[in-house]
């Protein structure tokens, strides 16, 4: 739910953590990155009735699966309208074939239904 958690624990963000470890706490990092964290916008999304597409990858070593599941659980708990697409890949492999096609197809179908 917090980008700070992703930066703190994500495999591809190790260099960032190595630079700030011992100088910045996880709590401070979450406050700094809070403006772009999903947790900051859930209450706003709850008031809107537009559909949301949540695409996630359970083998993601950057935005770990536990964080994606937190987002999904909060959308469900707050009854925020959403659809979920699970891609059988990781963070960076979403840009590679066939996952990029799967992602694009899911997005195109979602847009066709909701626009």
Image: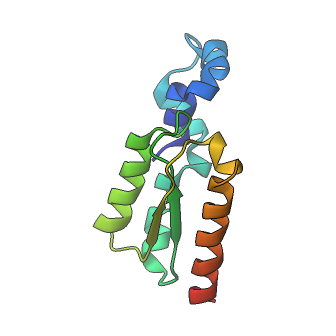
Image quadrant assignment for residue 15:
top right
**Residue at position x 32%, y 58% in the image:** 73
User: Which residue of the protein is positioned furthest toward the left in this rendering?
Assistant: 77
Residue 4's x, y, as percent?
54, 35
Image check: 1 left or right of 115?
A: left
Scheme of colours in the image: rainbow
Question: Please, is residue 27 above or below residue 1 in the view?
Answer: above
Front residue of this view, candidates 18 and 103: 103
**Residue at position x 56%, y 25% in the image:** 11
Front residue of this view, candidates 101 and 70: 101
Image quadrant assignment for residue 47:
bottom left
Number of residue marks: 0
**Residue at position x 32%, y 67% in the image:** 76
Front residue of this view, candidates 29 and 11: 11
Question: Please, is residue 77 above or below residue 49 in the view?
Answer: above
Residue 99's x, y, as percent?
62, 54
Image check: 32 left or right of 47?
A: right
Image quadrant assignment for residue 82:
bottom left
Residue 2's x, y, as percent?
49, 43
User: Which residue of the protein is positioned furthest toward the front in this rendering?
Assistant: 98
Image check: 70 left or right of 27?
A: left
Question: Please, is residue 114 above or below residue 46 in the view?
Answer: below
Quarter of the picture holding the C terminus = bottom right
């Amino acid at each position: 739910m917090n980008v700070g958690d992703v930066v703190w624990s994500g495999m591809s963000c190790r260099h960032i953590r190595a630079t700030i470890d011992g100088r910045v706490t996880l709590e401070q990092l979450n406050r700094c990155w809070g403006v772009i964290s999903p947790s900051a916008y859930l209450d706003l999304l709850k008031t809107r009735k537009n559909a949301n597409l949540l695409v996630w990858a359970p083998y993601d070593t950057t935005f770990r699966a536990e964080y994606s599941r937190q987002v999904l659980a909060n959308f469900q708990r707050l009854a925020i309208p959403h659809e979920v697409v699970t891609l059988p890949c990781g963070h960076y492999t979403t840009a590679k074939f066939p996952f990029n096609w799967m992602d694009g197809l899911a997005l195109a179908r979602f847009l066709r239904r909701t626009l």
